[in-house]
């Protein structure tokens, strides 16, 4: 066989391999992002459920404080996560860090609200 033909086949094979590898990498990144998004979305749902549970058992005079506390916490969460993404190098990285931040803060708030729920129930 002609040396040029062999070289072209090798280059063609290499290009196909590179294209398949980059496609596989992109697919894995999308799957990872979707998993994180599902986790974040689930934390949002759980946060609302736990908040509602606490709201339902708090006496009238403390409901206003709970609502105010939640509003303030939501403002804090937004500001904190905006701060977290400052050093991100790309939009994809910003989105990833932002979702991670929201998820982690949601988890902490859920724990705090659950602790409040237990304390209120024990009274």
Image (tube, rainbow, N blue to C red):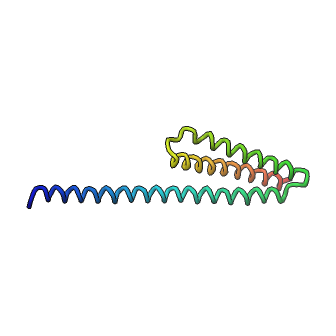
- Residue 62 image point, x, y percent: 87, 50
Asked where in the image residue 57 lies, by quadrant, the reply is bottom right
The residue closer to the viewer here, 55 or 102, is 102
Q: Locate residue 60 relative to residue 22 in the image: left or right.
A: right
Identity of the residue furthest to the left in this view: 1
**Quarter occupied by the N terminus:** bottom left
- Residue 82 image point, x, y percent: 63, 42
Please tell me which residue is depicted at 62% across the width and 39% down the height of the picture: 83
Please tell me which residue is depicted at 66% across the width and 47% down the height of the picture: 105
Please tell me which residue is depicted at 23% across the width and 58% down the height of the picture: 12
- Residue 43 image point, x, y percent: 65, 56
Q: Locate residue 3 relative to residue 73 in the image: left or right.
A: left
- Residue 17 image point, x, y percent: 29, 58
Count of marks overlaid on the render: 0
From the viewer's perspective, is residue 32 above or below residue 82? below
The residue closer to the viewer here, 107 or 87, is 87
């Amino acid at each position: 066989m002609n040396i040029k033909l062999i070289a072209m086949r090798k280059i063609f094979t290499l290009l196909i391999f590179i294209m398949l590898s980059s496609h596989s990498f992109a697919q894995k990144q999308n799957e990872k992002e979707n998993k994180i998004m599902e986790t974040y979305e689930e934390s949002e749902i759980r946060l609302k459920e736990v908040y509602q549970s606490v709201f339902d058992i708090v006496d009238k005079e403390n409901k206003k404080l709970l609502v105010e506390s939640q509003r303030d916490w939501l403002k804090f969460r937004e500001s904190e996560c905006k701060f977290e993404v400052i050093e991100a190098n790309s939009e994809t990285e910003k989105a990833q860090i932002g979702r991670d931040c929201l998820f982690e803060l949601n988890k902490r708030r859920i724990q705090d609200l659950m602790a409040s729920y237990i304390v209120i129930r024990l009274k």
